Image: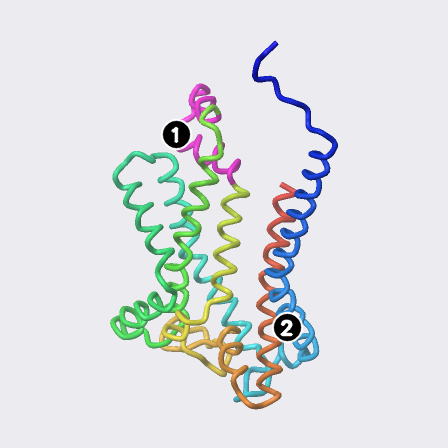
């Protein structure tokens, strides 16, 4: 018999353990409630006041000062997000694939370092960079293209890192099996590994969409603001967007401005939830 045999706990010891466990779980639950309550309260206020402000004119009329509709802001937000994804998705996904498949190369280390640095740069700094280089330097003025490229610079690191992690989650035996069948490395990566990592890649893209929809500071310096619908020009024409309405109109001492601000906030939340729901549905069907 071992000299270090453990003694079975006494009934009194078991009661103490249960008591400590119950206290711990109670404190944990209270902590979660304390953290979640401000968010829940904020969402409740936005939903309540946003629903009261919703009307058909929001989707058919453009902003007229501090009243009117939000058609120009809705249209501009969608165009900016789509434009940012057009630039960010190919660069981010390919960067993540390269870093995951050739992790020991010097260029991969440089890409990883730059991505980590860019995720820590404040968005207003990137906006000022876009203002200096594109709005002023290239002479584009406030425009859709300047805003979309600035948003793309913000979200490329997130797409690259999530793609890298998703690719690394696919075991090396899958790659070895593809090579054993005589497939080229490119075929293995894009036809075998990438489809297996698709859920993680799409998660990074959805994160990019959420960041793009919710940004204000970089767009103030690059996209500007317009009370009119988009005229089809990529440069020399500012565009509206929902976050500008939230940031600006909520500070106005008018009920019509507050209504537009809450309606815009509700639309931003609904847009993010809708994109996530569509993505999850597509992944489940796949």
Q: Position of residue 225 (x, y in %)?
A: 44, 79
204 lies left or right of 101 = right
Principal SS element in the magenta part? helix
Q: Which residue is mark 1?
A: 185
Give the secondary structure at mark 1: helix
Q: Nearer the viewer, residue 144 or 266?
A: 266
CA gap, disc 1 and disc 2: 50 Å
Residue range highlighted in magenta: 174-197
> In what quadrant of the picture does the C terminus appear?
top right
The answer to whether 168 is drawn above or below residue 210 in the figure is: above
Q: Nearer the viewer, residue 21 or 132?
A: 21
At 64% from the left and 47% from the top, the residue drawn is: 24
Q: Which residue is mark 2?
A: 46
Q: Position of residue 103 (x, y in %)?
A: 34, 35
Q: Is residue 155 magenta?
A: no
Give the secondary structure at mark 2: helix
Give the mark nearer the N terminus: 1 vs 2. Answer: 2
At 63% from the left and 51% from the top, the residue drawn is: 28
> In the picture, residue 3 is in which quadrant?
top right
């Amino acid at each position: 018999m071992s000299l270090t045999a453990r003694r079975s706990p006494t009934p009194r010891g078991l009661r103490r353990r249960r008591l400590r466990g119950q206290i711990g779980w109670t404190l944990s639950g209270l902590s979660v409630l304390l953290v979640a309550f401000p968010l829940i309260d904020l969402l409740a206020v936005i939903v309540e006041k946003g629903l009261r402000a919703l009307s058909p004119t929001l989707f058919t009329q453009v902003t007229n000062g501090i009243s009117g509709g939000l058609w120009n802001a809705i249209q501009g937000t969608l165009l900016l997000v789509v434009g940012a994804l057009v630039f960010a998705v190919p660069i981010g996904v390919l960067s993540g694939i390269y870093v995951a498949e050739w992790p020991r190369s010097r260029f991969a280390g440089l890409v990883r370092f730059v991505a980590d640095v860019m995720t820590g740069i404040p968005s207003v700094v990137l906006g000022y960079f876009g203002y200096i280089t594109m709005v002023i330097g290239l002479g584009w003025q406030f425009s859709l293209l300047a805003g979309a490229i600035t948003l793309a610079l913000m979200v490329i690191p997130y797409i690259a890192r999530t793609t890298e992690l998703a690719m690394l989650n696919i075991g090396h035996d899958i790659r070895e099996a593809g090579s054993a069948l005589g497939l080229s490395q490119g075929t293995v990566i894009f036809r075998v590994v990438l489809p297996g990592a698709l859920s993680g890649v799409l998660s990074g893209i959805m994160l990019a969409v959420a960041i793009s929809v919710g940004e204000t500071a970089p767009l103030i310096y690059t996209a500007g603001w317009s009370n009119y619908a988009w005229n089809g020009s990529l440069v020399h024409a500012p565009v509206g967007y929902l976050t500008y309405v939230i940031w600006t109109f909520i500070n106005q001492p008018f009920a019509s401005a507050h209504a537009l601000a809450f309606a815009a906030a509700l639309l931003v939340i609904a847009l993010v939830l809708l994109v996530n729901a569509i993505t999850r549905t597509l992944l489940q069907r796949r």
